[in-house]
Amino acid sequence: MSPKRSISSKEGFSDIFDTPDQKHSTKNILILSKNNSLGFSRIGVAIRKKDNRLAVDRNNIKRKIKGSFLAKVLELPHKDFVVYVKKNLKGKEEELKKDLDKIWGKFIGNND
């Protein structure tokens, strides 16, 4: 994934967490979004170390989330998205995929 599609944590996470334009969630994940003027969508992923101890597990989850984002990026509105993982998803890839497809669909159907 190109660096321009990523939101660095120091840059924009706090702004999106403080004042999101939209938010959608399932029992496993929460996705917050905020309009941007860049002309393309960006994503950031937040996973607590407390919930997913091993860096390998956190990185695998991040990789799956970013892959899902890239598959839908042309359909998504031009916003900054932050995906917050609520709990340990190790071994629950199908559940994560279903949740992401459901929430991306809400953002796609909600183009402003």
Image (tube, helix red, strand yellow):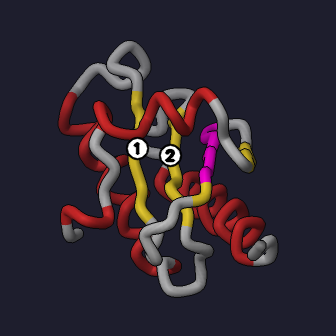
Image height check: is 6 above or below 84?
A: below
Instruction: Please tell me the numbered disc located at residue 7.
Output: none
Residue found at x 41% / y 35%: 46
* Element type where label 1 sits in the image: strand
The residue indicated by pointer 1 is 45
Determine the main secondary structure of the stretch shown in magenta: strand
Q: Position of residue 58 (x, y in %)?
A: 30, 37
Instruction: Please tell me the numbered disc located at residue 82.
Output: 2
In which quadrant will I find the N terminus?
Answer: bottom left
Image height check: is 108 above or below 52?
A: below
Give the residue type at disc 1: Val
Image height check: is 48 above or below 64?
A: above
Direction top: furthest residue: 50
Determine whether label 2 and label 1 are within 8 Å by CB: yes
In which quadrant will I find the C terminus?
Answer: bottom right
N-term-proximal mark, 2 vs 1: 1
The one of 13 and 1 positioned closer to us in this rendering:
13
> How many callouts does the rendering have?
2
Q: Position of residue 68 (x, y in %)?
A: 46, 69
Q: Position of residue 90 (x, y in %)?
A: 41, 38
Residues at marks 2 and 1, CA–CA distance in whole angstroms: 6 Å
Direction bottom: furthest residue: 74
Q: Would residue 30 be counted in the magenta stretch? A: yes
Give the residue type at disc 2: Val
Residue found at x 62% / y 45%: 32
- Give the side of residue 87 with respect to residue 9, left or right: right
- The boundaries of the magenta stretch are 28-34
Residue found at x 47% / y 28%: 14
